[in-house]
């Protein structure tokens, strides 16, 4: 018979058991469920609701069940619907009536809420650690490429020269914001719903502060109805995950472009690339493409959970069981993407010479040439137009600005002197950037120092 079978005069249809059950996916929460139940049993004993011996027996057997699950010895049953009732049934099978007392002053509604909050908290910690690992990789790549120059792009058109260290440190900033966002989400997840009962609180003299301490929550949820109905933390978490994936996807897009023969700025390690089944010469950046693709899955998960929660009346509704597949998928996808991405960038070859070479064409020094004329007293807008005409001349005659003679340059402005050539030298274009946060070595050095301080390295 079902744990809730008393009110029913018929068994549920097997098709209903099948359809209603979440055990296939929520068995992932066995650890959190047992953790929550142990804390609950301790609290019940402390408050005199259970005797100390009863609580001890429950805890001992929950520990044993935990071990059996980890050893793969437990077969969960669809007829017991979810992880909560499967574990409770296992306990009752072992210790009979004492096991039946565990669910005193508790509902599956506050039970499932505490389980997922524990799961999301752990996941945030793991994902934050993976992000920090990746940031360390970024720093070490940056340190090795302080003098590697490549074109900086806007509209994917060559714009101004930058160093590779500077370019890659842009991603460090994105991942720092991601960590902050997760940290913020953690604060709201860190609130204990257990002890709320089904929706209205319980008649027992429970101690929720004790439960919060036992389970490592900073605060308790203040309104029992909200506590069992709230899934905002899942929405926030998947939204944060979506932003992380968006950042990874942009990074991947650059790596894919850079791996092409057209750019040829990097080469993925053989261990992190794949071949073609028909074209023998192919070496494809599949991992980067797949991470870019998996971003779609996470966005889908966000829309999924937002749509599940939309229009749900207070308090618990079974719809909410559907929160778990998108949540679990997000955690798994994000963790594996971060893990493999980190290995991929650690092993990729950076083709410094090709980057440097690309920075020589495309008039990357045109803005510096305009700035030169500003220094000579010409208003910027006018300088812009002079250099524009100069670039047009170069394009039409297949020249670079620096390959023109001073006499030729003077035809565009008599303010040009010999020092123009130093001013528009690519290296100088980088080092002469004075604003904080710029691509100059001085500024990138500060950036890296700050980054290391942030990571305590
Ligand atoms: N399996 C359920 C879920 O994941 C547990 C809570 C069920 N509560 C209920 N009143 N049916 O949401």
Image (cartoon, grey):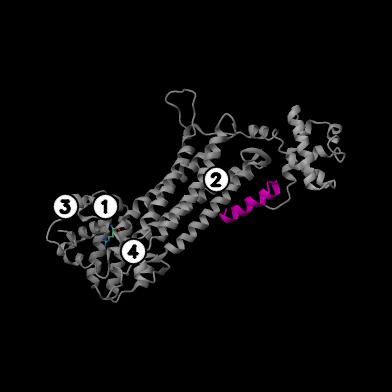
Mark closer to the chain start, 2 or 4: 2
| Mark 1 secondary-structure assignment | helix
| Mark 2 secondary-structure assignment | helix
Q: How crowded is mark 4: few (under 14 residues within 10 Å), some or many (20 or more)?
A: few
- Please give left or right for residue 128 compared with residue 155 in the image: left
Q: Name the mark nearer the viewer: 1 or 3.
A: 3
Q: Name the mark nearer the viewer: 2 or 4.
A: 4
The quarter of the displayed image where residue 360 is located? top right
Residue 149 seen in this snapshot: no
Can you give x and y, in whole percent of width and height, for residue 24 in the image? 27, 49
Asked whether 296 or 273 is in front, the reply is 296
Can you give x and y, in whole percent of width and height, for residue 6 in the image? 15, 64
- The residues bearing labels 1 and 2 have C-alpha atoms spaced at a distance of 39 Å
Q: Mark 2 points at which residue?
A: 137
Q: Name the residue under label 3.
A: 13
Q: Name the residue under label 4.
A: 313
Image height check: is 324 above or below 7?
above
- The residues bearing labels 1 and 3 have C-alpha atoms spaced at a distance of 17 Å
Magenta: predominant secondary structure element?
helix
């Amino acid at each position: 018979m079902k744990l809730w079978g008393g009110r029913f005069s018929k068994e549920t249809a097997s098709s209903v058991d099948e359809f209603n059950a979440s055990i296939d996916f929520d068995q992932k929460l066995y650890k959190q469920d047992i953790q929550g139940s142990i804390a609950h049993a301790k609290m019940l004993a402390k408050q005199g609701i259970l005797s100390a011996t009863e609580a001890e027996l429950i805890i001992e057997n929950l520990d044993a069940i935990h071990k059996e699950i980890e050893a793969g010895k437990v077969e969960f049953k669809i007829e017991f619907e979810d992880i909560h009732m499967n574990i409770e049934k296992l306990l009752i099978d072992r210790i009979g009536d004492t096991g039946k007392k565990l669910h005193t002053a508790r509902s599956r509604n506050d039970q499932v809420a505490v389980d997922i909050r524990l799961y999301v908290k752990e996941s945030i910690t793991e994902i934050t650690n993976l992000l920090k690992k990746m940031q360390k990789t970024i720093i070490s790549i940056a340190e090795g490429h302080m003098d590697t120059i490549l074109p900086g792009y806007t509209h994917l058109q060559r714009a101004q020269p930058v160093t590779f260290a500077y370019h890659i440190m842009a991603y460090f900033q994105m991942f720092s914001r991601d960590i902050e966002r997760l940290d913020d989400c953690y604060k709201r997840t860190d609130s204990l719903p257990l002890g709320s009962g089904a929706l209205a609180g319980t008649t027992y003299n429970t101690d929720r502060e004790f439960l919060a301490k036992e389970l490592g929550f900073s605060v308790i949820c203040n309104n029992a109805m909200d506590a069992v109905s709230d899934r905002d933390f899942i929405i926030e978490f998947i939204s944060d995950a979506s932003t992380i994936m968006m950042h990874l996807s942009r990074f991947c897009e650059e790596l894919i472009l850079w791996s092409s023969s057209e750019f040829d700025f990097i080469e993925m390690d053989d261990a992190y690339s794949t071949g073609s089944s028909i074209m023998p010469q192919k070496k494809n950046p599949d991992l980067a493409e797949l991470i870019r693709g998996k971003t779609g899955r996470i966005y889908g998960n966000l829309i999924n959970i937002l749509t599940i929660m939309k229009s749900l009346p207070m308090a618990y509704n079974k719809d909410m069981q559907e929160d778990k597949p998108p949540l679990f998928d997000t955690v798994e996808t994000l963790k594996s993407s971060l893990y493999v991405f980190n290995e991929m960038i650690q092993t990729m070859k950076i083709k410094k010479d090709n980057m440097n070479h690309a920075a020589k064409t495309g008039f990357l020094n045109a803005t510096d040439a305009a700035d030169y004329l500003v220094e000579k007293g010409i208003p910027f807008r006018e300088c812009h137009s002079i250099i524009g005409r100069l670039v047009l001349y170069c394009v039409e005659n297949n020249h670079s600005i620096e390959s023109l003679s001073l006499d030729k340059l003077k035809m565009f402005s008599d303010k040009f002197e010999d020092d123009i050539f130093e001013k528009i030298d690519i290296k100088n274009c980088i080092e002469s950037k004075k604003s904080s946060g710029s691509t100059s070595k001085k500024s990138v050095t500060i950036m890296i120092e700050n980054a290391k301080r942030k990571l305590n390295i």
